[in-house]
C-alpha cells in the first residue's frame, strides 16, 4: 500500500483578494466541518460522513483542507486518490464554499494536489466533472487539463461526466483505445479481460454480463458447492481461440495450477481434470505454449506488434487480497505498461477512471506479475487470427 506522509500547512496562492488561509492535510477532528461543507456546497452526489471517515483513515487517499489562519472554519477541501501499484492519481472531489468561490481557492488547491501527486511519482492526475459545471471545467482547462472522454449517465441524476487528465511527468498520455469493461462478480476477472481483448479486434462486440458469464463458464477450472472457481491460462486461451482470436500461452510452472489454496482433495481432482481438458484442446487447436516465465521484453514486443495480453498478477499487490487476479496489458508508453484492471473497488470510491488505462512502472509490473509461493508467471498473448 502507498504510504502517505503529512505535510506542513502552506499559504493559499490564490488571487490578491483571496482570504488569508492555509492548506493542510485533514485530520479526524475535521469530520464535522467536512460534512457541513459538503452539504452546503453540493445539491446531490454528496460524499457521506461514513465515506469521509474512510477517506481520512485510508493510506491510499489524501484529503486537504483550506482554513483561515489560527484554526478558523474550513471553506474548501480536495480529495486525491492513489491506486496502489500504479502511476496515476485521481482528483476524487474538490469543494469551495459558495462564499469563497471566485477567489482563487480552487486553483490553489489544484496546484497543491498536483504537487502531492508529483511527489508520489504519479505521472498524471485524472478527474471527472459534470458536463454542466462550467466554472469547474474552466478551472481545469485553465490549469492545463485535457479532455479525454465522457462517461454517460455517471451521476445520480443521470448527468454526463466529462473526463480530464493532466500529465505531470513526461509527454506520453496514459490513454488507450482498447474498450474497458468492469467485472460484475468477484471471480470473472479473466473473462472480463478476454472480453476487452475481443472488443479490440471486434469493434461491434457487445460487452455485457451475459457474455462475461458465458466466457467464465467456458474457461473456468471448476464450479462446485464450495463456490465458483477462477480461470487459468489454458482455459482462457481456448475460449479466445474459439471466438476467433490468435492465442499464445506463457506459463512458468508445469502441471495443474492454483492447487495450493485448495484443501479438498475432491476439488483438486476435478480442477486437475478440467485443466487437462483445456490442455488437450489447446494442443488440438495448435495454440503455442511457451513453458517458461515471460519477460518484460516479451510483453513489450507483443504490445508493439498490436497484441494484448491477459496477465496474472498478485491481487495482494493491487488491492490487498491474496488471490490470483487477471489484468489486460494493452499499452507501453516507454516507461510503463498500460493496463485495464477489470476490478473496481467501489467501496473505496473508485470508478472506471481508477481502473482503465493504468500506467504501471516497468519495475512494479515485473514485480506484481507473479502469484503464490512459487512466483507463478502466466499470460495469454492475444491478437488477430
Image: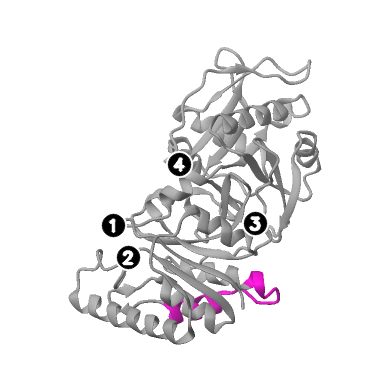
Instruction: Please report the residue visible at 45 percent of the width from the left and 30 percent of the height from the top.
Output: 28
Q: Are marks 4 and 1 in contact (CB under 8 Å)?
A: no
Image position, residue 249 (x, y; %): 45, 70
Callout in the foreground (4, 2): 2
Name the N-terminal-most of marks 4 and 3: 4
Q: Which residue is mark 2?
A: 253
Task: For mark 3, give the secondary structure.
Answer: loop
**Tag 3 residue:** 156
Asked which secondary structure carries label 4, the reply is helix
Question: Which span of residues is magenta-colored?
Answer: 199-219
Q: Closer to us: mark 4 or mark 1?
A: 1
Residue tagged by mark 4? 54
- Nearer the N terminus, badge 3 or badge 2? 3
Q: Is residue 171 above or below residue 299?
A: above
Residue 84 visible to an observer of this rendering: no
User: Separation of disc 1 and disc 2 at Cα?
Assistant: 8 Å
Which one is closest to the eye, mark 3 or mark 1? 1
Q: Position of residue 377 (x, y in %)?
A: 39, 60
Return the residue at label 1.
374
Q: Are marks 1 and 2 in contact (CB under 8 Å)?
A: yes
Label 4 and label 3: CA atoms lie apart by 21 Å
Judge depth for marks 4 and 3 and give the one in front.
4
SS for tag 2?
A: loop
Residue 321, percent from left and from top: 36, 53
Say left or right for 292 vs 365: left
Amino acid at each position: 500500500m502507498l504510504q502517505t506522509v503529512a505535510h506542513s500547512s502552506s499559504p493559499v496562492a490564490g488571487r490578491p483578494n483571496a482570504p488569508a488561509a492555509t492548506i493542510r492535510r485533514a485530520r479526524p477532528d475535521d469530520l464535522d466541518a467536512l460534512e457541513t461543507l459538503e452539504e452546503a456546497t453540493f445539491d446531490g452526489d454528496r460524499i457521506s460522513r461514513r465515506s469521509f471517515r474512510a477517506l481520512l483513515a485510508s493510506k491510499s487517499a489524501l484529503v486537504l483542507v483550506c482554513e483561515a489562519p489560527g484554526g478558523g472554519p474550513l471553506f474548501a477541501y480536495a480529495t486525491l486518490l492513489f491506486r496502489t501499484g500504479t502511476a496515476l492519481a485521481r482528483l476524487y472531489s474538490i469543494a469551495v464554499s459558495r462564499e469563497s468561490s471566485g477567489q482563487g481557492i480552487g486553483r490553489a488547491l489544484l496546484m497543491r494536489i498536483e504537487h502531492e501527486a508529483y511527489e508520489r511519482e504519479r505521472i498524471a492526475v485524472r478527474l471527472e466533472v459534470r458536463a454542466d459545471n462550467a466554472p469547474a471545467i474552466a478551472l481545469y482547462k485553465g490549469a492545463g487539463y485535457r479532455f479525454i472522454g465522457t462517461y454517460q449517465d455517471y451521476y445520480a441524476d443521470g448527468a454526463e461526466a466529462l473526463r480530464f487528465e493532466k500529465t505531470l511527468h513526461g509527454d506520453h498520455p496514459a490513454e488507450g483505445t482498447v474498450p474497458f469493461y468492469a467485472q460484475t462478480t468477484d471471480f470473472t476477472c479473466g473473462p472480463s479481460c478476454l472480453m476487452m481483448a475481443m472488443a479490440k479486434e471486434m469493434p461491434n462486440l457487445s460487452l455485457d454480463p451475459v457474455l462475461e458469464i458465458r466466457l467464465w463458464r467456458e474457461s473456468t477450472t471448476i464450479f462446485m458447492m464450495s463456490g465458483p472457481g477462477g480461470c487459468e491460462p489454458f482455459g482462457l486461451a481456448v475460449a479466445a481461440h474459439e471466438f476467433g482470436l490468435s492465442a499464445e500461452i506463457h506459463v512458468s510452472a508445469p502441471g495443474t495450477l492454483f492447487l495450493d489454496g485448495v484443501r479438498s482433495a475432491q476439488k483438486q481432482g476435478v480442477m486437475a481434470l478440467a485443466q487437462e481438458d483445456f490442455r488437450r484442446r489447446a494442443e488440438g487447436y495448435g495454440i503455442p505454449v511457451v513453458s517458461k516465465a515471460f519477460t518484460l521484453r516479451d510483453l513489450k514486443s507483443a504490445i508493439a506488434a498490436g497484441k494484448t495480453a491477459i496477465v496474472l498478477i498478485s491481487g495482494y499487490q493491487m488491492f490487498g487480497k491474496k488471490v490470483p487476479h487477471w489484468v489486460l496489458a494493452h499499452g507501453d508508453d516507454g516507461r510503463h505498461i498500460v493496463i485495464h484492471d477489470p476490478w473496481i473497488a467501489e467501496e473505496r470510491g473508485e470508478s472506471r477512471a481508477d481502473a482503465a488505462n493504468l500506467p504501471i512502472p516497468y519495475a512494479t509490473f515485473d514485480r506484481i506479475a507473479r502469484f503464490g509461493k512459487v512466483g507463478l508467471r502466466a499470460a495469454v498473448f492475444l491478437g488477430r487470427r
